[in-house]
Image (spheres, rainbow, N blue to C red):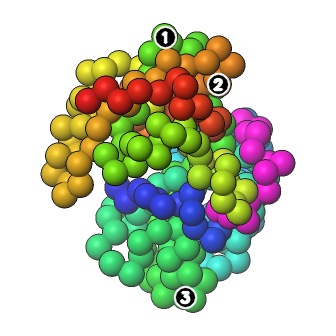
Amino acid sequence: MKKFDNFQNSDYMKNISESRYKSHGLKHIRTQFDNVLKKYNDNYTIDYFEDEEIFILNIKNLDKRTLDFILSRTELLGFFPSVFNVDGDNKDDSVGDIDDFINQVKNYNLPKENVVLIQFESWLDKPIKTPEKLYHVCREKNVEKILRYGLYPKAKHKISHHPDRIFLVDNIFYAKDILNQLKMDNEKYVILEIEPSEDILLRRDPNYNVGLYTTQNIAPVYIKKLI
């Protein structure tokens, strides 16, 4: 499944209104999206995942008008596109992120018979209890800067309206597992240990069953290099 590795920085996501981050829930997706989408295109199915507050749209004959409706209506209801694929895969190198995908559809470069899958997630997932320790895997070259300035979502220091996330885990073994997965990369990665402040708001990452995230800054006083 093709993920939007850089959907946070895409032109589409930069134009999302910050006032719309709060999700209105899957109930409203059924009543205010699913029921209306039939007027544009009835060749689709939607799978709902209540626990993760995710829904997956599979649609054929996707055109510009329908895509415009899909993106605008889901934004209004507090959901964003996080994963996509075309006919089960993305073999076309020209379709690399959400902007490429939107352009393909709007320029009529996507064959109508293709089955397009788009996964949508709620802007904000349910908060969870803050653990005593958190761990963050990052590139070693970034450690000095992080220990000096802290961790912060990109949107906190860039001209962007999308609430970027700091991804974390609450178990050192999960962090080591991530570290091992990244060994195939040419860059060196390390693990940072974080003693979170009491006011940090953490949420479960629906794309990684042991993952957490926050949209808040983490000050350097709470961070130390572990491995």
Q: Residue at x 23, y 48 (%)?
A: 188
* Mark sitting on residue 132: 1
Q: Nearer the viewer, residue 167 or 17?
A: 167
- At numbered mark 1, what does the secondary structure look like: helix, strand or loop? loop
State the residue position of label 2. 201
Q: Which residues are magenta?
A: 13-25
Gap in angstroms between the C-alphas marked 2 and 1: 13 Å
Q: Is residue 133 visible?
A: yes
Describe residue 114's horizontal placement relative to residue 217 as left or right.
Answer: left
- At numbered mark 3, what does the secondary structure look like: helix, strand or loop? loop
Amino acid type of the residue that numbered disc 2 sits on in the rendered structure? Leu
Q: Is residue 76 above or below residue 200?
A: below
Q: Could you tell which of marks 2 and 1 lies nearer the N-terminus?
A: 1
Amino acid type of the residue that numbered disc 3 sits on in the rendered structure? Tyr
- At numbered mark 2, what does the secondary structure look like: helix, strand or loop? loop
Gap in angstroms between the C-alphas marked 1 and 3: 51 Å
Q: Viewer-nearest of labels 3 and 2?
A: 2
Q: Position of residue 169 (x, y in %)?
A: 41, 26
Residue 17 part of the magenta segment: yes
Q: Could you tell which of marks 3 and 2 lies nearer the N-terminus?
A: 3
State the residue position of label 3. 108
Q: Quadrant of residue 175?
A: top left
Describe residue 20's horizontal placement relative to residue 156 as left or right.
Answer: right
Q: Is residue 60 visible?
A: no
Q: Position of residue 61 (x, y in %)?
A: 54, 75
Q: Residue at x 65, y 79 (%)?
A: 64
Q: Position of residue 216 (x, y in %)?
A: 65, 35
Amino acid type of the residue that numbered disc 1 sits on in the rendered structure? Glu
Q: Nearer the viewer, residue 159 or 9?
A: 159
Q: Viewer-nearest of labels 2 and 1?
A: 1
Q: Viewer-nearest of labels 1 and 3?
A: 1
Q: Residue at x 48, y 88 (%)?
A: 109
